[in-house]
Image (cartoon, helix red, strand yellow):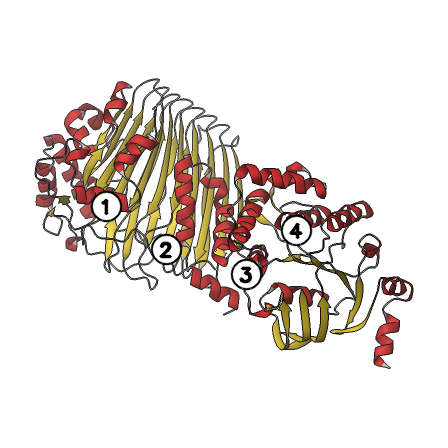
Amino acid sequence: MSAATEQIDDLLQRRYGAGFITDIEQEYAPPGLSEEIVAFISTKKQEPEWLLQWRLKAYRRWLEMKEPTWAKVSYPKIDYQDICYYAAPKSKDDAPKSLDEVDPELLATYEKLGIPLHEREILAGVAVDAVFDSVSVATTFREKLSEFGVIFMSFSEAVQNHPDLIKKYLGSVVPVSDNFFAALNSAVFSDGSFVYIPKGVRCPMELSTYFRINAAKTGQFERTLIVADEGSHVSYLEGCTAPMRDENQLHAAVVELIAHKDAQIKYSTVQNWYPGDENGKGGIFNFVTKRGLCEGERSKISWTQVETGSAITWKYPSCILKGDHSIGEFYSVALSNHHQQADTGTKMIHLGKHTKSTIISKGISAGHGQQTYRGGVKFSRGATNARNYTQCDSLLIGDKCGAHTVPYVDVRNSSSKLEHEATTSRIGDDQLFYCRQRGLSEEEAVSLIVNGFAKQVLKELPMEFAVEAQKLLGVSLEGAVG
Amino acid sequence: MLKIEDLHVSVDRTPILKGINLSIDAGQVHAIMGPNGSGKSTLAYVLAGRDGYEVTKGRVLYKGKDLLEMAPELRAAEGVFLGFQYPVAIPGVSNMYFLKAALNAIRKHRGQEPLDAIDFMKLSKEKAALVQLPDELTKRAVNEGFSGGEKKRNEIFQMAMLEPTLAVLDETDSGLDIDALKVVAEGVNALRGPDRAMLVITHYQRLLDYIEPDRVHVLAGGRILRSGDKTLAKELEQKGYGWLTEAEAA
């Protein structure tokens, strides 16, 4: 091993900063999955009969499905009967009505994570819905948003307060039988966020959700549904963390976006689930289905993700470009350090005429990390004059990691255009030395080079989160760039 | 300022430098000339602390301290600057951002407050004018898509910003046309001062028409064969390196 590689290895040994465990009383469902458990969750949530039936349908489909094996990730077999499908902080009253009623311990957890709800409320003007294990804890800024007719609440509340909207859109983009993990989520999802932006409204602030898995041996299955009605605009950000635990934890979320005519949805993710230790022990298994439907003409959906956490990432935020002239975008930075494995990318499915999509993927592998870009672009027969531009770049740090690119292209008409560019590079000793000769430490140099590599994507994030993501990239690389 | 004593350096176990002795005082400019493969760049890299250069014997004192013990970034913070022969590109990192990070890292080491954006911009405007570096280049990513001449000007610009006490310029003239050479030389001359020492490494005498050295050393085969004043450079231009290396062999 060269001296430079050793130094880089040192850098990559940095510690996970969000790995504390919050000591609060939890209410659990017994481990295991059955129709009874599905019904238990539904009852806990006081759901209407149709939703229970929807869950049961998903559960029955799930029983018939096989866990997918095509992704370039390997992990021990998951025992689905050993997982808790419901855990909620036990609260004195039924549910907190305002931040003042939220368990101070819980608020302290968010403080530690650097998302003080109060402060966000006052300073940042970000409306936050915080999901702790399975239950949405507090939604800030609701009143202000309601002045604009914007609905932003936990999924459970939306089921109670806006059943018509939920019934209309739930499963309309990701059907229950879409895939193994989506079916599982549909059966047991416990909470998440719901957003509705009425016609012509530009949401006056960034909407934001923080997810945190706290309870041991608990799966988190949140469900997010965002509907942007005609001509509306919304920008939404989710952040995720989990405590450090030796055993693996399962996270299988579903996100559905619907953009009507002339509507725009920007969905940004900063994912920092616990990645496991430097030997690959523990960490979150992150199997997520995210899909957006550009239903109306000239609608636009933009996914931006910064993925630095999780032991396993299996995630392909996609766009169905149905409306003519609709636009889909995918900007991604994924980082695999230590023994992390990420198989991530997107699918752009062009159905409408003159639809356009852009894919910018930046993969960073360090330590023993394995990184796969898997992306599909489909131009259907009716998608005349559709265009796609794909760029995937890989950056390798050290000599034990891997980067893989698996593009799929399916073209059914002759007027569409597709461009694909790909590069693989390595952080060179010469780059590091150049930076150090100018006075930067090796750590600063690596962080600088990586952030330069990821800049094209980071600039797509809302300002304050871009800063957070930059820091996160630096921290996640301590001990992993090669 | 800088005192090199009997320095022996190997790369991959092959001896490259075989006993260098050199002493540079504050305020002086020394030139090192020599044929290709004589060890000029090796000397520059060893002074800056690059990996892969094994010092097998000798020592280097910088301001009385053991230079070879220091990490590269510490040397930089202590005022050692290397103008690279082949400056590398850092895609996506703007020149200004890079330089501000570097300058503030060095200022921190000196116990100075970091420069804020406004003061930094003011300083950089002033220094960019010195090497006639176009505004547009300061905004681009570090050395990305720069021409050879632009890269070298950028090196001198960085030197002007970082205000080192010992500047080692490794073949800063290579690849420059005569106009660019003059600009670079003027930049270097503007930075000459009583507290600053410079070591200018060059293959050709040409650069020394514009940067007048106090001393000239001829390096060949890993040894300094001859030292003299600036007339030595003229002599080399007329006779080539052959007469010295042959004299050595005889």
Q: Do residues under tags 1 and 3 come within 8 Å of each other at their CB atoms?
A: no
Q: Do residues under tags 4 and 2 come within 8 Å of each other at their CB atoms?
A: no
Disc sitting over residue B74 in the figure: 3
For badge 4, the amino acid type reads: Met
Q: Is residue B198 visible?
A: yes
Decide which of tag 2 and tag 1 comes sooner along the chain. Answer: 1
Q: Which residue is mark 1?
A: A109
- Residue furthest to the bottom in view is B250
Q: Count up the numbered dots.
A: 4
**Mark 4, residues whose alpha carbon is within 10 Å: few (<14), some, or many (≥20)?**
many
Q: CA distance from mark 1 to mark 4?
A: 47 Å
Q: Quadrant of residue B150?
A: top right
Decide which of tag 4 and tag 3 comes sooner along the chain. Answer: 3
Q: CA distance from mark 4 to mark 2?
A: 42 Å
Say which residue appears at 77% left-offset and 66% top-offset.
Answer: B36
**Mark 2, residues whose alpha carbon is within 10 Å: few (<14), some, or many (≥20)?**
many
Q: CA distance from mark 1 to mark 3?
A: 39 Å
Q: Nearer the viewer, mark 4 or mark 2?
A: 4
For badge 2, the amino acid type reads: Gln
Label 3 secondary element: helix
Q: Measured from the top left, where is residue A169 in percent x and y?
A: 25, 28
> Is the same chain shared between marks 1 and 3?
no
Q: CA distance from mark 2 to mark 1?
A: 27 Å
Question: Disc 1 is attached to a residue of which chain?
Answer: A
Q: Which residue is mark 2?
A: A341
